[in-house]
Amino acid sequence: MTEQVLPDRAAGSDDDALPDSRTRRWPTGLRPSRVLPPLVVLAALVAAWQLYSARGGLGPDVLPGPWRVASAGWAARATLWQETVPTVQETLLGFSVSVVTGFVLSVAIDRWVLARRSLTPVLIVSQTLPLTAIAPLAVILLGFGLVPKVALVTLVTFFPVTIALVEGYASADRDAQALLASMGAGRWRVFRSVRLPSAMPFFFAGLRIAITYAVVAAIFAEYAGAYRGLGIFMQSMVSAGRTDLELAAVFVSAALTLALYGLTFLVERVTMPWLALQRASERAP
Amino acid sequence: MSVGGPAPSARAIEVRDLDVTLGGRAVLDGLSLHVEAGEFVAVLGPSGSGKSTTFKVLTGALQPEHGEVVVDGVALDGAVGTFAYMPQTDALLPWRRVLDNLTLGLEVRGVPRREARARVAPLLGVFGLAGYERAYPFQLSGGMRQRAALLRTVVQDCGALLLDEPFGALDALTRTQIQRWLQSIWMQYRWSVLLVTHDVREAVFLADRIYVFSPRPARVVACVDVPLPRPRTLAMLTDPVAAGLEAELLATLLGPEGG
């Protein structure tokens, strides 16, 4: 028999099943082999940029060097933080609404053929609307507050979530569903016990696509009209000729997207410990 | 190990004159078979001959146009959950730990989790799964997964086990091991079993009686008793009685040679 070595029950922790100490010391996403290459590329780009601006470049008012952007950003860190907080709120709130909306839509589409036929074209059309046209309209309709931002973030992000869930449900194992049915499980029970858990890896893939749009959508919504936020801050910095602070805000928004992207992995790992273990064991020789 | 009486929960099944049409094509055509309480019955048939369709009728997933299923003299009438079904793949849910997979059937049937676990516990050793309760299915070998799937089926304590080509995906060695093991625990518990298989030798080794289905639309073309004593051994399969039976069954399945 070639049964695998298994976690000790007394130890209990999921990590005990990981096959080698290397994977145990470094979480998958933070292993040096994963982290170093992108850091090197990033450092090279920043260095080239610094070199270019140090030799004249486009002039410090058009394209300031990275050092100047960083020092200006650091000096204005209190302001930047103040402007970041509302953007984060809009993004997270919009994202939550998006997940709930996506879930409800996906369940309806999965459950009723009529819903699939009638909703799918409408959802696709909703993704063709140009943001440049919708954002000002949202401000006129919903004001300068939080609501139009949340609406815009939701509009931009619910689609990948919905589609991922619908595809995920369809991927559920037929035998497992037949098995549940043979035990006397009703439709809802089969959904809850087989279809929904099967969709979770798809859901997180969709979530990661959505999250890369989310921060941009919030900033765009602010651009169209807001009291506070990174979007309106960027706009006013460009008007004031402070491209260094505008670029500093751009970096903050990029960092925000990266952080949220990373967060999806963390949530995925917590909600689906088995998947992380399975992937780790598949990678192991 | 002695052959005791049938399990207390074991039921006698009688399938009478089933007709099933799917998409305009007749799949079952007046199909009848029966399983006594505590009897091990195998069904052999060519691919796509309606063996799985028969199981769908028994699990209540499909209503026949004609005919009925009678359990201990009472018509089933499309009721769901009377039998414990084991599908072709092990269908273990990858996000549930082994123990939670094993209790699934009981949970769906409304047994509280604590009681479900208590019912699974004494069987873990018998099924060679003790110590693996907290493992995830991907951490088990193919043979262990199949034993887990069988435990999940058995613990539901239903009238009969419906096994749909349960060992088809295993390698030959593991398959032989698990067949021997299945015989030994069946002799211990004596459930009513209906086993669908492609494998003539598997049917001869395990079953008390074997039905052979025709190609679509399925009818029973042969029903033979397996006169081998239990516990059966691999060596018995090569003796003239078993070898002759195997040849006869193969001939029935494949049709006359050269034809």
Image: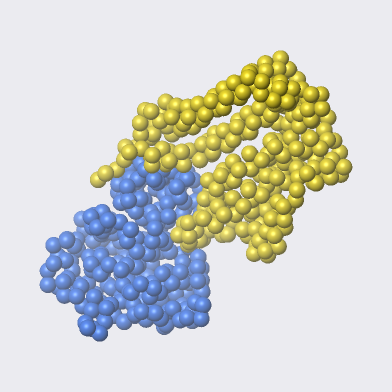
Chain colours: A yellow, B blue
Residue at (46, 54) in percent of width and height: B105
Q: Relative to B135, is B185 on the left or the right?
A: left
Q: Position of residue B107 (x, y in %)?
A: 49, 51
Q: Is residue A77 above or below residue A26?
A: above
Of B212 and A275, nearer the camera is: A275
Q: Quadrant of the C terminus of chain A?
A: top left
Q: Quadrant of the N terminus of chain A?
A: top left
Q: Is residue A127 above or below residue A283?
A: below
Q: Is residue B184 visible?
A: no
Residue at (69, 55) in percent of width and height: A124
- Quadrant housing residue A187: bottom right
Residue at (63, 47) in percent of width and height: A161
Residue at (54, 57) in percent of width and height: A170
Of B137 and B3, nearer the camera is: B137
Q: Relative to A231, is A143 on the left or the right?
A: right
Q: Is residue A85 above or below residue A128?
A: above
Q: Position of residue B119 (x, y in %)?
A: 41, 48
Q: Is residue A99 above or below residue A21?
A: below
